Image (tube, rainbow, N blue to C red):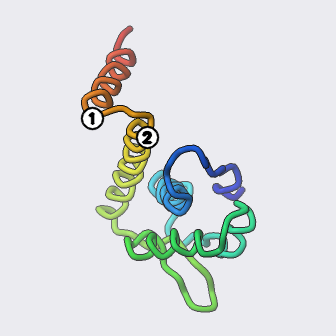
Amino acid sequence: MNPLATFEIDYNSGLPVWIQVKNRIARLIGTGEYAAGDRLPTVRALAVDLDISYNTVNRAYMDLEREGYITTRKGRGTFVAERREVGADRAADAAIELVIDDMIRACANAGMDDDDIVALVRARLARRAAP
């Protein structure tokens, strides 16, 4: 099954669509849903599946390639890049950082300042730690 099959764009998040696509793919790579060497959907196919512009997907793919997550082989497709173990650990960390960045943006878009965001995270962690 295609790990991107259930992905839906959140047009109310305040996060640009290309960043949402990039973050989702990076997260899927970081969590191992996409492994090194796995072929990704073509830019056009993903654009059609998500009902977004080809240019939007292309921008996400270009950024992912620049950051070393994916590689494009002319005439063959786009694949998850081979990453050393240290790189794989970094990919998992980066996926988590992307989730945190998304949360911070959503909180800021909701009008929260940095202190409010930190207080919210502390409260959630305390709730999780409670028996």
Decide which of 114, 111 is in the foreground and name it.
Answer: 111
Q: Residue at x 73, y 62 (%)?
A: 51
Residue matched to label 2: 109
Residue 19, image x, y percentages: 49, 59
Give the structural element (helix, strand or loop) at label 2.
helix
Q: Outermost residue, top direction?
A: 131
Left-right relation of 5 to 35:
right
Looking at the image, residue 39 lies above or below residue 113: below
Decide which of 98, 111 is in the foreground and name it.
Answer: 111
How far apart are the alpha carbons under marks 2 and 1? Answer: 12 Å
Residue 11, image x, y percentages: 61, 49
Residue 91, image x, y percentages: 38, 58
Q: Outermost residue, bottom direction?
A: 75
Q: Residue at x 63, y 51 (%)?
A: 9
Disc 1 marks which amino acid?
Asp
Decide which of 62, 16 is in the foreground and name it.
Answer: 16
Q: How many marks?
A: 2
Q: Outermost residue, left direction?
A: 115
Question: Could you tell which of marks 2 and 1 lies nearer the N-terminus?
Answer: 2
Disc 2 marks which amino acid?
Asn
Where does the C terminus fall, quadrant-wise? top left
Q: Callout 2: 10 Å neighbours few (<14), some, many (20+)?
A: some
Query: Is residue 118 shown to the viewer in this render?
Result: yes
Tell whether label 1 touches label 2 (CB within 8 Å): no
Give the structural element (helix, strand or loop) at label 1.
helix
Left-right relation of 118 to 75:
left
Query: In which quarter of the view is residue 107 placed?
Result: top left
Q: Residue at x 36, y 11 (%)?
A: 130
Residue 124, image x, y percentages: 38, 21
Which circle marks residue 114 in the picture? Answer: 1
Query: Is residue 34 shown to the viewer in this render?
Result: no
Left-right relation of 22 to 116:
right
